[in-house]
Image (cartoon, grey):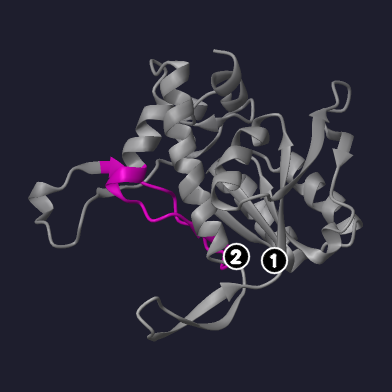
Amino acid sequence: MSSSSNQPTSPKQSVGPDYRDEKQKPTATVSTAVPFENVHTLPQTPQLIALLTMIRDKNTDRADFIFYSNRIIRLLVEEGLNHLPVVEHAITTPVGRSYAGVQFQGKICGVSIMRAGEAMEQGLRECCRSVRIGKILIQRDEETSMPKLFYDKLPEDIADRWCLLLDPMFATGGSAIMAVDVLKSRGVPENRILFLNLLASPEGIENFAKRFPQLRIITAFVDQGLDEKNYIIPGLGDFGDRFYTM
């Protein structure tokens, strides 16, 4: 029996509004469920599945890949912001009426894992004006096959901020784990880190969620698994190459 025969299959379900009859809703592959309270998967809506279909397609050209990836990134950032603390904030409207609202509490910053994570910076800037963004460069050591920290540049007051860690692909989790260790070494509490991610593997999610139980993971989709080369399957290829060069 081939190794691919032993791979778990991705779940499928009808997608669409609840008010539509099941016969009117198409069946599509949806995110794999994971049993961790600190992992939050975007709702598997027709819009999200259609966007993911576009960026997974090997025939999608670079311009369309960038456009549809940016739409998913925007959804991830918006959901990530929902997990930040707010406080009560009453205001008066232009017609003289009061409104019991809320406002964000505390400062935030983005931290991208270079280079693919830099593709998510614009989506964060579009939602958070003048947001500070730090960078971490981690590459795999050719001799040991382990992640190695090459460079980091972070805001001096990062320990006082909520950090949105940005990386679109989450396979084994080695780079993300090292990035979190860097943030924690700079004084950032684990519960002030949110990891925003487009596509993850169940193996990476499990390893990461257990290691950092207070950290929140916001992902668009948990895929089928990893192949023998630790590539996410069915995946979408190399995100950085498709976004920047192909």
Q: What is the quadrant of residue 142 in the picture?
A: top right
Residue 82: image x %, image y %?
53, 65
What residue do we see at 66% from left, 36% from top?
Answer: 117
Picture disc at residue 137: none
46 falls in the magenta region:
yes
User: Magenta stretch mostly in which secondary structure?
Assistant: loop
Disc 2 residue type? Asn
Which label belongs to residue 213? Answer: 1
Q: Residue at x 51, y 42 (%)?
A: 73
Residue 176 location in percent, x, y?
A: 73, 45
Judge by depth and name the residue closer to the eye, 125 or 37.
Answer: 125
- The vertical placement of 227 against 178, above or below, is above
Residue segment shown in magenta = 28-48
Whether residue 216 is in magenta: the answer is no
Q: Amino acid at mark 1?
A: Pro
The crowd level at tag 2 (other Cα within 10 Å; few <14, some 14-19, many 20+) is some
Q: Secondary structure at mark 2?
A: loop
